[in-house]
Image (spheres, rainbow, N blue to C red):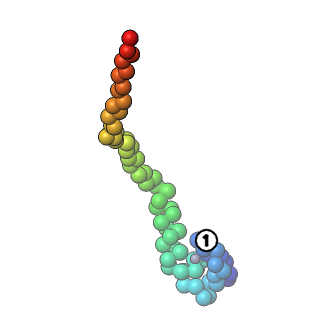
Amino acid sequence: MKHRCPICKTATDSEMHKEFPFCSERCRLLDLGNWASEKYVISNPVFDESEEEDSRPSDPDDNDDNKGAHG
Ligand SMILES: [Zn+2]
C-alpha cells in the first residue's frame, strides 16, 4: 500500500516504511505534536519597552552684542 507522508508529503510505502503512513518516526512524532499543540496555545509575553529620554548637552548660545550710538 502506498501513501504520502502527512507531514512532509514524501511518498511512503506500507511495506517499506515502518512508520507508515509517515515516512519516518520523526514525522510521526511531529504529527502527534501537532495534535498536542492544538490543546493549548503558546503565548509569548509582550514586552512594552518605552524609550528613555535622552538628554543632549545643550550648547550655550551666547550671542549678545550691544551697540551704542554716539550722539
Ligand atoms: Zn515525512
Residue in the image at 38% along x and 11% along y: 71
Rendered image quadrant of residue 21:
bottom right
Q: Position of residue 54 (x, y in %)?
A: 34, 41
Q: Please identify the quarter of the rendering in which residue 68 is found.
A: top left
Residue situated furthest front in the rendering: 71
Quadrant observed for ligand 1 in the rendered image: bottom right
Q: Which element type, helix, strand or loop, lies under badge 1? A: loop
Most extreme residue toward the bottom, as rendered?
16
Q: Which residue is denoted by mark 1 in the rendering?
A: 6
Residue at 47 percent of width and 59 percent of height? 37
Residue labelled 1 has its Cβ within 8 Å of some atom of ligand 1: yes
Q: Quarter of the image holding residue 1?
A: bottom right
Q: Is residue 1 left or right of residue 7?
A: right
Placement of 39 over or under 60, stated as above or below? below
Q: Amino acid at mark 1?
A: Pro
The number of callouts visible is 1
Give the x, y percent position of residue 38. Answer: 49, 56
Q: State left or right for residue 35 relative to residue 51.
A: right
61 and 17: which one is in front? 61
Q: Residue at coordinates 36% horizontally, 30% vertically from top-left?
A: 63
- The residue carrying pointer 1 sits among few (fewer than 14), some (14 to 19) or many (20 or more) residues within 10 Å by Cα, namely some
Figure check: 57 above or below 64: below
Q: Nearer the viewer, residue 33 or 68?
A: 68
Which residue occupies the foreground of this view, 19 or 53?
Answer: 53
